[in-house]
Image (tube, coloured by chain):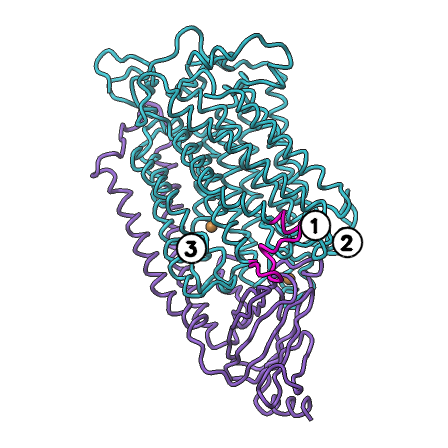
Amino acid sequence: MLNWLRWLPENVSTYGGDIDSIIALIWYSTAVWFVLTFGTIGLFLILYRRRAGRPAAYVKGERLAEALWVLVPVVMVLAIDLWLDFRGAPVWAKVMLERPPAALSIQVTGKQFNWEVVYPGPDSKFGTADDRQFDNELHVPVGKPVRLLLKSKDVIHSFFSPHLRLKQDIVPGRAIEAWFEATKPGKYELPCAELCGFGHSGMKGWLYVHPEEDYNRWVKEQWS
Amino acid sequence: MTTATAQHGEHGFWTTHVFSTDHKTIGKQYLTLGLFWAVVGGLLTYVMRWQLAWPETVVPGWGEIGPETYNALVTMHGTIMVFFVAMPILLGAFGNFLIPLMVGARDMAFPRLNMLSLWVFALASLLLFISFFVPGGAAAAGWTGYPPLSAKAEYTGVNWGMDLWILAHALEFAAFLMGGVNYLTTAIAFRVPGMTFSRLPLVIWQQLTATTLFLLSVGPLIAGAVMLLLDRQIGTHFFTPGGGGDPLLWQHLFWFFGHPEVYVILLPAVGLVLDVLPVFSRKPIFGYRWIIASTIVAGGLSFIVWAHHMFVSGIDPRLAMPFSITTILISVPFAYLMFAMIATLWRGSIRFDTPMLFALGFIAMFIVGGLTGIFNGSAPADIYISDTYFVVAHFHYTLFSSVFFGGLAGFYFWFPKMFGRLMNETLGKLHFWLTIVFFNATFFPMHNIGLAGMMRRIANPLQYDFLVPHQWINVVATIGTMLLLASQIPFVMNVVWSLVAVRPAPKNPWQANTLEWTAPSPPPHLNWGEALPVVYRGPYEYSVPEAPEDWLPQDRVLAARAR
Ligand SMILES: [Cu+2]
Ligand SMILES: [Cu+2]
């Protein structure tokens, strides 16, 4: 219950570990502050509870020398905050900005209440005759960077893979890019994470991460 | 002062109790409406939580709920709690009641405008209430009302409910704009002699900052609401891509208002706590001027952080880090406020009366909420935790603690002044301990299940294989909710019993310094008799060495030397 990090689902993407380490970093820094502040409050409440014959001190905390007791911890908060951002920026860039060259492009279109997954087929081009659509099934090979083209037919949806640590809202009228590289074969859920109507609860697909040969066999079956 | 006095003529039953221009009556009316909505919003949580713990079963006392109903419940719970509970209680009730009494005014600057503010809010409440019963049911697009879901009836099946939801918001905003004009004018122009800005109680400073934030931020959202209504009613395309509109425009308008709005709720609660702490520590607040500066800095920063609600919304990803930095910076002024509260306890002489317990409860719970805010404010962490229950846990630790712990600290503290009756301390303490225990039982586990990936606004967690093993967390939170609701029984008993049984409150039961305690309990119409008090010093002069007692009211002449 208290060690929050144990609650994260298993990570199966190349960048998920970086996101987890940022969460862990914040968890440890905030845990220290939690202990310090709660400890101080508890101590003060016990030490300075009302007792006969002991009046409160007339301290206003206005002079700089007094205010430093509070300002120094505030500066420490600032330093830790900036450090967390400093550590976080490269992770954000890795997930959202620096997309490696993709081995495979797949278009995922959200609509009330399904994911329509379209593969460009052998010619690697969307909008041609060999495109193939699968509802709520996303098949990818393990260890290959995959590029997603996210679109919506109606309202805003959010493409979420808890195990990949990937979440991206999908806005109608835009084509939004995302990428991932799965590290472990398996079958993982793909829920929609943005309220999209009465069928939002239960709107989900499955991500199938195949070992390379299995993936090639699957491709052959579909496009033969 | 003459104009305000002249407007108050004779008053019969209706003008005294219903269509009153008296700021105290209006404050109590706001309080009543806010408490009514708190009951409605609270009961909705019972239905929602039951569904989440035991999906697709019959909710005792309600029946079965389908997914459409669940979406309406989620939407209305958020809307009610933010706009119809937090604002009317923290701003409407405390602002109206306290500002004239604490600055030494006989009423608000514009009493009739003030009455209009209340009745416009009442009309907004009526529309929102009706929206539960119209065909199609209440709004179901989330309290943030993101289009296109909110822009077309076909997407939710809700038609009338959504329009009423927009209208209720528009009227609510108008009500608080009118109130805000009054708050600012009264506190700036109607202060008694000697009440300089540097002697103004901090709760007034917080109310003024909150009001200013509201006035400056609400304009874009009102424009957004009009555009949304036009999209719905006459087929414009401000927010729908078909005709060239952009759904993200709404999110920018909403959150440009939305982040300042959370401070509109938070700051008055912080103010209540800042005024309660010195009284029960018998010590000046730690760093009065620094607190005011921090508040203003926080208010200013709140205008440049809004995109932290939109990290994964599809905005240009290069925007995220700048907004992540401003967001994380905002923890600095709030860290100052929290540390100053803690430092006020240092070398105090602390009394644990009910208002103090709730004030301490606010500090403790808000620290937890502030710390979890750092997770949300970090753009990379947010990729995973946005739209999960971690966020739900975070904003309940900040906002619920503001309204509940902050609001109740103020309620128990000023109840004797508002109603001229003392409350029962034993019931008050029982109320506090039950509330804080079951508050944590309800919301702490949401951090865990949020990190496990559970999404917000889903009606049935059992539809997801990865959540099934964690379902017991939902059961814990639901039982916590029911016990939290039951924990309010001692509060209701206490209020009713205090109002019925006559235990008259003295003028100044807590031996506090600020001006409202120099008026009778409850203060009469126009607050003071012939003469208004004159102010000689700041509001937190406790345990002054040269004073005869451990408190030194703002209006007392001290022979030796005036500080
Ligand atoms: Cu959805
Ligand atoms: Cu915000």
Q: Callout 1: few (<14), some (14-19), or many (20+) C-alpha neighbours within 10 Å?
A: many
Against B526, residue B284 (above or below) is below
Q: What residue span does the magenta drawing correspond to?
A: B228-247
Which residue is depicted at the point 51% across and 85% down? A103
Relative placement, left or right, of B190 versus A172 is left
Chain whose colour in the figure is cyan: B
Q: Write the residue at 43% across / 33% down.
A: B273
A42 or A194: which is nearer to us? A194
Chain letter of the residue carrying label 2: B
Residue type at mark 2 is: Thr
- Among the chains, which one is purple? A
Q: Is residue B454 above or below residue B395?
A: below
* Image point (55%, 67%), residue name: A174
State whether residue B279 appears in this view.
Answer: yes
Element at badge 3? helix
Is disc 2 in contact with disc 1, using a CB cutoff of under 8 Å? yes
- How crowded pointer 3 is (Cα within 10 Å; few <14, some 14-19, many 20+) is rated as many
Residue B374 circle label: 3
